[in-house]
Structure formats: C-alpha cells, structure tokens
Image (cartoon, rainbow, N blue to C red):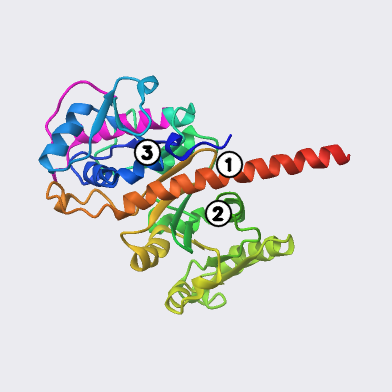
Amino acid sequence: MVKKAENIIVGISVGDLNGIGSEVILKTFEDTRMLELCTPVIFANVKIISFLKRELELTAAIHGIDSLDQLVVGKINVLNVWREGFDVAFGKNDEVVGSYAIKSFVAATKALKEGKVDVLVTAPINKYNIQSDAFAFPGHTDYLDKELNGKALMFMVHDELRVGLLTDHVPVNEVAQHLTEKLLTDKLETIINTLKQDFEIEKPKVAVLGLNPHSGDNGVIGNEEEHIIKPTLKKLFEAGKMVFGPFPADGFFGSAQYEKYDAVLAMYHDQGLIPFKTLSFGNGVNYTAGLDKIRTSPDHGTAYEIAGKGIANHESFKEAVYVAIDIFNRRNGYQELTKNQLKTKQKQL
C-alpha cells in the first residue's frame, strides 16, 4: 500500500541526552514543512524533551503521548518510554544517561519490528556508556542485525557516493581474520540487492578496495588480495555480477574513481569512513542496509564538546530522515513491481 507522505511514521530514538541528539532532532522538525513529509515520534519522555527544548531555546511544538495508538499525524509526537526524571549534564559521559539512550532505542526498534512505525532514525549514542548486562552490543547496527530479518551492512550514503563496509566495529588487527570468500560474497550481494531495491539502480556496478597498501602489490605486501579477494570477485563477475577491483584505497579516492561506480565496498571502518566523511561530512547518512526494515542515522557522534550550546548542525540528521523516507517509498515501489512481475509469470505458466 502506498502511504500518503504525512502518514509515514518516523520513529526516532533520542540518543545520548548529554550530547547533541535532542538538539538536531528538534531543529529538524522546527521546519514545519517536515511534517508534510512524515509524522515523527520521539521515543523518550515528554518532560525531558520539554526541558531540553527550553534549555536550547528551540520553538518546535511537541505533543506527549503514552502509547502509539495516541499518535497524532502532523505533530511532533513524544512517546513516554519512561516516567522517572534524571539529571541532564551536557557534555558529560554518564552511564545513567546511556541506559536511557538504550531504553529509547530498544523501544523504537520494537515498534519498527511490529510495524507500528515505518522507519527508524537513530540519534547518536556513546558506545562506551551504553554497555550493560542487558545490552552488550558495540552499537546500533549489531543490535538491529540480531532483532530484524536479514544481514546488516553499514552503508554510508550521500548523493551518488555510497560506501559499504566489509567489517565495521572490528579492531584493525583482526580485520584480516574476518576476510573470507563467504563474507565478501554476502556483503557484495547485499550491496547489489540494496542498490536495486532501495536506490532504483537496475544494473549496479560495485568497486571493491584492497585490504593492504597498494592492494597488496601482487602479493609483495600481504596476500589477501591474491588468495581471497581476486578469486571471489572473478567468480562473482563470471556469474554476472558487476564487481570490480581490488583497488588501492588511497589512489581510488584520490583520483575520484569512485564516481564511476554505484557503490564502494571497503574492507574496514576507517578505510571507508575517512574518505566518505572527508567528502561529505555534515550531509552524509549511515544506512543499515540488508534488513527487512529501514534504519538511518546522521554521520556524526554525540559531539559532547558542543552539546547544550545551541550550535549543532542538524543537516545530517535531516538528511537521515529524507533518506529513510525515500528508501521506504522506493522499496515499496520495488516490491510492488516485482510482485506484479511474479504474478505475470505465473499466469503465463
């Protein structure tokens, strides 16, 4: 079913309340035109959000609700996930505040899973202060991978630049241990399917970066390219997948070769995110591809150093909302199209 724009429900996890999350959320929806594109629901506590709104001198009108059944289309809804109060101290790393960030995220994920919100946009968390016996995940992506169907892929997007990660929150000295033909194949297939389903690219071309400097120099600097990456890409290419590489990462971005491809697969976190953020910081979006539900987030962290000062740039968070809505609409269109094709084939048989 195609939904009207304002009826697309955007669930928002509030992130670390000592950071800039609440500021960029409220600034995004101060522009009332955003409420013509979707209806947001912030998973938090209306008293806390009201307090932060006053502290930051923001004007967005919020509407408190106690259940999603009370949600009002065209309003900035704040769902009371908890009732108790606690102290907000901008810029402070606080485990108590981290626990409320996770309460918000877990509740929002549950609503996404149950179809009570259409997409999820997550404000930044502090990966250190969220750890507990109840939540022992490095971050959002790992939890979503467990809770939702599919295989999660961290996919950074900005306009035509799209960078996926073979490994994300893995120590650098362990990356080579994770590099296998199966993982490389799975990640590339996820990227290809994502480009078709979520970005309307019929025949996607994907570039793959090498693991080692100079992409191994034919085995002189490491042999992962020769033993794993090249044979895997050859097998996929012969099967009709438009995958190319491995490319040396420095020259690939330095010479703007990325402009020739629909996406890039990097071997590890910083290899992909340093060039991505250099080219698009403040406007990029982190999209969790490969799952049956849609989640995006801004390309920055909690920014404790500017929290509470009212100077946070909200463009990346706003872009995360736009991307989530666009992908929701494209995916629905793709599913309708492929469903109709299947019906036509069945009739022909």
Query: Could you tell whether 7 is left or right of 35 in the image?
Result: right
Query: Could you tell whether 236 is left or right of 165 in the image?
Result: right
Which stretch is magenta? Answer: 81-110
Q: Earlier in the sequence, mark 2 or mark 3?
A: 3
Q: Quadrant of the C terminus?
A: top right
**Residue under numbered circle 2:** 199
Q: Secondary structure at mark 1?
A: helix
Please state the horizontal and vertical placement of residue 225, each as a whole percent of the image: 56, 68
Give, as a three-letter code, the residue at label 1: Asn
Nearest to viewer (mark 2 / mark 3) = 2
Q: Which mark is residue 332?
A: 1
Asked if residue 109 is among those painted magenta in the image, a careful observer would answer yes
Give, as a three-letter code, the residue at label 2: Phe
Q: Which mark is residue 137?
A: 3
Q: Residue at x 45, y 34 (%)?
A: 7
Residue 73, picture quadrant: top left
Q: Residues within 10 Å of mark 3 (few under 14, many from 20)?
A: some
Please state the horizontal and vertical placement of residue 20, each as a whole percent of the image: 21, 46
Query: Could you tell whether 94 is left or right of 25 in the image?
Result: left
